[in-house]
Image (spheres, grey):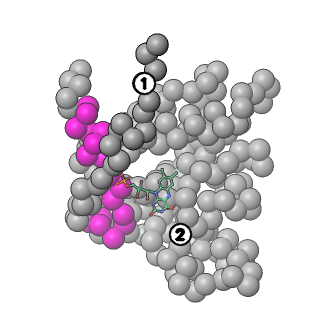
Amino acid sequence: MNPVALNELIASRRSVYTSQFVPGKVIPEEIIRQILENACWAPNHGNKEPWQFQVYSGNGLKKLANLQAGLYKQYAGEGFKEIKYEKLRNNPLRASHIISIGMKRTKGKQIPEVEDIAAVACAVENIYLSVTAYGLGGYWTTGGITYMEEAKPFFGLDSEDRLMGFFYLGYIAIPSPQAKRSPMDAKVSWIKE
Ligand SMILES: Cc1cc2nc3c(=O)[nH]c(=O)nc-3n(C[C@H](O)[C@H](O)[C@H](O)COP(=O)(O)O)c2cc1C
């Protein structure tokens, strides 16, 4: 283990959006599998492993694009915006792979929901870091149909579960600019006595 390399990996992780991807360049499935393997090593309370992923690629991207655009059109009502509809229909086609991020509650003795959500977010950070380590780009989006109750069954989720968004992946054509964070000391207090 090289902690200096890890520090660098964490600080260099950036969200890379579809407009920055190399169009049409597909990530080998072994890499996607390893990224998901890393996701599944996330910490989780009670060993519930509450993450549930679906991986879209090839024609699967079209299927997801049509599904999300269709659901949006069906349920948007008065607030329907053509531009949003077109984005939902086209944006997935720019990715190599898209992973839907689900939180699945297990039956029986449950831990607080927020902890299952936190565990899935840890899994997504593992995805982010793995993507960075492979020199790939990607980002987590919670836009579109993420919070639509009607979308859940399409992602293998029941009403007590949550759809937590989508992770888009691709090769990087245009890297993201360097990011900034507030100084750590603005967020940390030390209690020693
Ligand atoms: C829970 C969560 C939801 C996000 N949803 C979106 C989104 O819907 N659209 C988007 O463009 N970026 C989304 N992002 C990515 C953030 O915009 C991004 O992480 C932030 O700008 C910081 O940039 P960085 O990831 O490069 O450090 C999301 C990130 C998180 C953690």
Figure check: 37 above or below 45: below
Query: Residue 17 at x, y = what percent?
Result: 36, 63
Q: Quadrant of residue 186?
A: top left
- How many numbered marks have been drawn onto this rendered protein structure? 2
Query: Residue 168 at x, y = what percent?
Result: 42, 57
State the residue in front, 9 or 97. 9
Residue at screen point 33% across, 59% down: 16
* Residue located beneath label 2 in the image: 65
Callout 2: helix, strand or loop? helix
Instruction: Choose mark 1 or mark 2, whichever is in front.
Output: 1
| Residue 142 seen in the current view | yes
Figure check: 84 above or below 145: below
* Residue located beneath label 1 in the image: 190
| Residue 146 on the magenta span | no
Residue at screen point 69% across, 82% down: 79
Q: Is mark 1 within 8 Å of ligand 1?
A: no
Q: Which residues are magenta?
A: 6-22
Query: Residue 189 at x, y = what percent?
Result: 44, 30
State the residue in front, 180 or 17. 180
> In the rendered structure, which disc, 1 or 2, sits on the residue that comes first in sequence?
2
Residue at screen point 19% across, 29% down: 4
Q: Is residue 88 left or right of residue 36?
A: right
Other residues around mark 1 within 10 Å, as few (<14) / some (14–19) / many (≥20): few
Residue at screen point 35% across, 38% down: 184
- Disc 1 marks a residue whose amino acid type is Trp
State the residue in front, 185 or 68. 185
Query: Residue 123 at x, y = what percent?
Result: 48, 37
Callout 1: helix, strand or loop? loop
